[in-house]
């Protein structure tokens, strides 16, 4: 299960403070108090460098400022996470490895709440919550899967559903590694071009968590 740091606590504070306000880039900035724990890296506004905030320090989060890169990242990550949950839902009845079963439970426990947090962010910005309440296969066509990095195709999902035992374990790991690598690609893009502090922190969290999980899955293979 994902471990939340003080940095993630800052994200939750900023998300609450953001409310429903804001144009795309010039909304008012919001102060927040950094929680206890390790220092937090606070992304700067466009043209500004990131800085370190210590526990107890009040920081200007800029929670109201966002751009289309931030929105696109959040909207794409919702169905991306949903497909990961579709994949983990198959593990219980098909996997042979007990280690894989435990690993899938970790993914499931982490990504479900992340979907809710991203959808809340999108609603606060008055943006469509892409894929809300639906799995990838139920609402997106093949072309969308190709455009979204790492997404398994309908054919790959059907093959996974039809497999079992060691064959399922291997295919699941191969598809989920590619899936995680796609998430890293999208996170890298928003880190380069986005400006919203919550989207930036989400992307950093995706980078850290899914990079570690890729290493674990490669070891399983």
Image: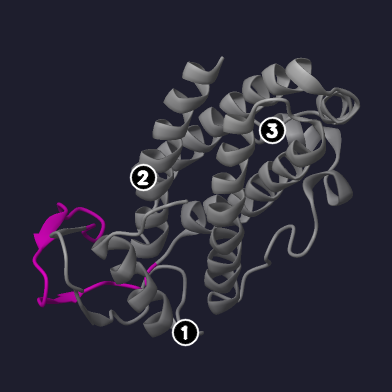
Dot 1 lies on which element? loop
Tell me how far mark 3 sits from mark 2, CA to CA: 20 Å
Task: Check disc 2 and report the residue beneath it.
Answer: 191
Instruction: Look at the image and tell me in which quarter the C terminus lies.
Output: top right
Category of crowding for the residue at label 1, using alpha-carbon neighbours closer than 10 angstroms: few (below 14), some (14–19), many (at least 20):
some
The part of the image, by quadrant, that contains residue 198 is bottom left
The tag on residue 185 is: none
The tag on residue 21 is: 1
Q: Is residue 142 above or below residue 83?
A: above
The tag on residue 151 is: 3
Give coordinates of residue 161: x percent, y percent. Answer: 87, 31
Q: Is residue 72 left or right of residue 37?
A: right
Give coordinates of residue 186: x percent, y percent. Answer: 50, 39
Tell me how far mark 1 sits from mark 2, CA to CA: 23 Å
Q: Residue at 23% across / 80% down in the picture? A: 32
User: Disc 3 vs disc 1: which is toward the camera?
Assistant: 3
The part of the image, by quadrant, that contains residue 102 is top right
Category of crowding for the residue at label 3, using alpha-carbon neighbours closer than 10 angstroms: few (below 14), some (14–19), many (at least 20):
many
Residue stretch in magenta: 42-65
Viewer can see residue 149: no
Q: Is residue 55 left or right of residue 23?
A: left
N-terminal of the pair, mark 3 or mark 1, is: 1
Dot 3 lies on which element? loop
Q: Residue at 42% across / 82% down in the picture? A: 16
Q: Is residue 80 above or below residue 153?
A: below
Tell me how far mark 3 sits from mark 1, CA to CA: 32 Å
Dot 2 lies on which element? helix
């Amino acid at each position: 299960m994902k471990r939340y740091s003080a940095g993630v606590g800052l994200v939750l504070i900023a998300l609450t403070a953001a409310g429903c306000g804001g144009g795309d880039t010039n909304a008012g900035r919001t102060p927040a108090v950094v929680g206890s724990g390790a220092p937090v890296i606070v992304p700067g506004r466009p043209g500004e460098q990131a800085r370190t905030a210590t526990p107890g320090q009040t920081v200007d989060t800029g929670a109201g400022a966002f751009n289309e890169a931030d929105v696109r990242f959040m909207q794409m990550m919702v169905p991306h996470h949903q497909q990961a949950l579709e994949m983990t839902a198959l593990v219980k009845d098909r996997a042979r490895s007990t280690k894989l079963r435990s690993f899938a439970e970790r993914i499931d426990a982490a990504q479900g709440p992340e979907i809710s947090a991203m959808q809340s962010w999108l609603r606060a910005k008055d943006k469509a919550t892409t894929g809300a309440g639906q799995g990838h296969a139920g609402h997106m066509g093949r072309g969308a899967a190709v455009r979204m990095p790492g997404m398994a195709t309908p054919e790959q999902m059907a093959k996974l559903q039809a497999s079992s035992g060691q064959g399922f374990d291997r295919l699941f790991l191969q598809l989920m590694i590619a899936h995680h690598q796609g998430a890293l690609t999208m996170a890298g893009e928003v880190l380069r071009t986005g400006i919203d502090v919550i989207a930036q922190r989400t992307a950093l969290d995706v980078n850290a968590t899914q990079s570690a999980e890729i290493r674990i899955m490669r070891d399983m293979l």
